[in-house]
Amino acid sequence: MVDEQVRIWRWSRRTLAVVDEWVEDHRWSMNMWKSDSDQEELRPWSMARELPKFSHSFLSLYCEEWGPISSFLRVACPVIIEKIKGMLGVFQWTAHIDPLNYGVFIKHLSAQMIHSVSTSHQINWRPRLRGRVICCSMELSFYFGSHSSYSFMGIFFCLLLFTFFRNSRVVLADSEYLIGLGSYDITGPAADVNMMGYANTDQIASGVHFRLKARSFIVAEPVGNRVAFVNLDACMASQLVTIKVLERLRARYGDLYSEQNVAISGIHTHAGPGGYLQYVVYIVTSLGFVRQSFDVIVDGIEKSIIQAHQNLRPGSLYVNTGEVDAGINRSPSAYLNNPASERSQYQYNVDKQMTLLKFTDNEWGPIGSFNWFATHGTSMSRTNSLISGDNKGAAARFMEDWAKQKSFGTQSHSSHVAASGTHNNQQGFPRRVSSIIPPVHENSNKLKELVSSFKASGGMQLSGPQSIVQRVRNTFSQGSQQNFVSAFCQTNCGDVSPNVLGTFCIDTGLPCDFNHSTCNGKNELCYGRGPGYPDEIESTRIIGDRQFTKAVDLFNTASEQIKGKVEFHHAYIDFSQLEVTVSSSEGKQVVKTCPAAMGFAFAAGTTDGPGAFDFKQGDNQGNPFWKVVGSLVKAPSKEQVDCQKPKPILLDTGEMKLPYDWAPSILPIQILRVGQVVILCVPGEFTTMAGRRLRDAVKEVLTGDGNGEFDNNVHIVIAGLTNTYSQYVTTFEEYQIQRYEGASTLYGPHTLNAYIQEFRKLASALLTDQNLHDQGPQPPDLLDKQISLLPPVIVDSTPSGLHFGDMSNDVPINSTFKRGDVVSATFWSACPRNDLLTNGTFALVEFLDSSQNWVPAYDDDDFCLLFKWSRPSKLSAQSHATLEWRIPQDSLPGVYRFRHFGASKSFLGSISYFTGSSTAFAVV
């Protein structure tokens, strides 16, 4: 086997050298091929005349190293593909030549190849070869077609693979889709940056609860369309992020991925760093634009899509649905204003249905799941300062850990808990490493002896960010098999709260006022209570666990296979002045949306995070004093006031343009289709009833045309907070009540009807395969106009005689803890903004194995381990890192210690990396 791998490597390197030499020799031809347009049809064949030298060299190498074609197909093809892709990445700088694009020609050629192979002799494929025709031909044709400088190589490789597969007399097993999933770290600055969601200026990041991820799936037809969906552990998508991600994808893949078929959606956690949106109103509390927050999200999305693209393999999808009890309606008085006849059609005043997609690889089996369920990411409160994915991020962690344990063949307690839905484990944390570390320590006296042997290490300098290789999740590497990816996506969560115990006054303990959510007239005293009250982390765990448990159940029982086309449609709409046709008692009439504006109840906040001063929900009059204050910023015109009625305008954001736009006006809407699953991508937070109306309207279009392509079994889901952010969307009736959601419906009372009107157009286009040539006005790219007032890190220091990584407050010597206890240690540290340690960790709990080696057991991506960072004073250059571990009930007895990683900044600006470990302690 080793000899074969050596031959693969040697032959691939030599092949790459031949390709390189041939491209260098013929680069001059690229310009010569740019002949007049009337000769365009002849160009591919002109290019073909240049291929003999290259193909002769290529085939000579092949014949020299390998004889049997089957060996080449089994081993060499994947290596060649990756080598050529890598080579093209190196040569991307030639794109400025503006070479010819023969993608259509190559795509047609590839389709003919697949058709020809499919009609050849039928024999069974070995699992490793299944789908190689489509994987090789389509990936090469799309890739080379997108990088038009190398279209001649695309043609050659399509022909070459065609010859090989024809001679091998093999065919593709039935597989309707190519499927790929990816995931990448997007954890932003864990210090000094205001968190996005609550608009609370005092909520400044100071540590990590667990890390944030961008999770992606790509579903592609073997010959035809593809869609990419990205789920972010972030408050929402950002127009600027979307623009820059698409620019990068275009540079890498050409037209393969665009705003048409790529959707980027946020889970709506209120515990992630802000400053990554481009409109003023969304970055005021973060002191403007935060480049570090922005860059890590853009990078992570791009890399997750690249992973998914590289992981594309033949596979199948399944869909399943079920009910979850993980949310209540936080604005029931507004919901009750909807028609009684409409409300009577539904059992609940929130949507409890979860829709789950299960992804399976034809060879490897289950590889991931994405689901959509409505509940706010507000289990973590407005005073929390730890970066967290909240309940949906927690659910994703739990399910990915469950899947990885299952792939190891373990039957851990938490796996049984997840599958059965029972919870004997009080902590409920899915096991991370216990199943792969042998229980070597059974005698508590021996443990104590071992503990006494390991003292704190003291701070040590590192040559680089070595925490990356210490990640616990690296333990679960599966070789060439892609990691299991599970995403818990957001949908119409606008009026849905995870604080399911209800709302209570913090001064009296009595329920809040029903209509206004106040306590003695003050909204600041009215808070919702989560199921773990008063412990917000426990509430996060419980709501996350409810979603996780149902997702496992749906995953295990999914049997409805997804079949059908992959399609997409997208449009930009100017919502500030859109004409909308609505029905009324007087017949049809044309109304208009309005420029964006925020009402008084916006400042009141919600029961998940109340506002300040004397604002209150349900206010459709406004306060004279605050009207004057708002007018000093920008007084709304009479036309705007009339358009927005009955909303009293606090901030006329749609007409505020200094220093640049305060709110969006041009919004993207998008439909993605995979078989009988249709995803409606919306750039805001739809309330429960608003989401129901939108889904029903689209379903009516899809099932009412009579062609039978869709029936009542079509699964329509809303992907909220997607591609950009424009706050809330209520029904016309809910808007009249002017609770927080209505006051935050930017474009006036007819906003929902505008969405329904435009989505009906997209749905009709889906049925007719019509191209929407008029994509509408383009949203602005405001990156060059961004202003940042966040001061940089100047310098880090420690007290005299101490080093970064030294202990400030160590674990007590010879200490012993039980499961369920909380143990902590504090290190002298530096600002986490110096290096985000992306795909690394600031915190580790290490376990002493039977060989006396320290191995990673838990890191800062675990729910049970907290990384808390602090300064002795606001302007101090010194700082502390406290690692706090709530010992899971299923952790093994043994010897443990803390280890901290960080990066410090010198006065001259250089970055140095360090680590330090605590005194060991025992868990019995």
Image: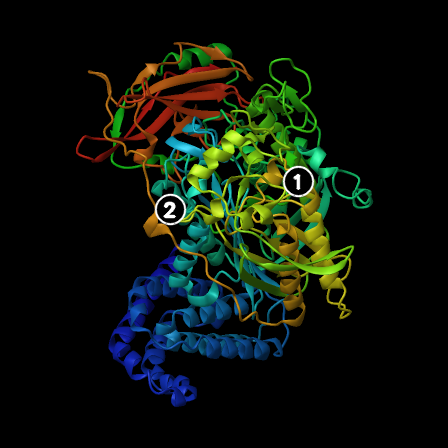
> Taking 244 as reference, is 114 above or below it?
below
Which comes before the other along the chain, label 1 or label 2? 1
Q: Which type of secondary structure does the marked residue at label 2 adopt?
A: loop
Q: Going 41% across and 28% down the picture, which residue do you hit?
A: 204
Residue at label 1? 552
Q: Is residue 15 visible?
A: yes
Quadrant showing the N terminus: bottom left
Q: In which quarter of the image is residue 454?
A: top left
Q: Which type of secondary structure does the marked residue at label 1 adopt?
A: helix
Towards the viewer: 522 or 880: 522
> Taking 110 as reference, is 537 above or below it?
above
Q: Going 44% across and 77% down the picture, which residue do you hit?
A: 160
Does 904 sit left or right of 196 as displayed? left
Crowding near pointer 1: few (<14 within 10 Å), some, many (20+)? many
Towards the viewer: 204 or 854: 204
Residue at label 2? 658
Q: Which amino acid does label 2 sit on?
A: Leu
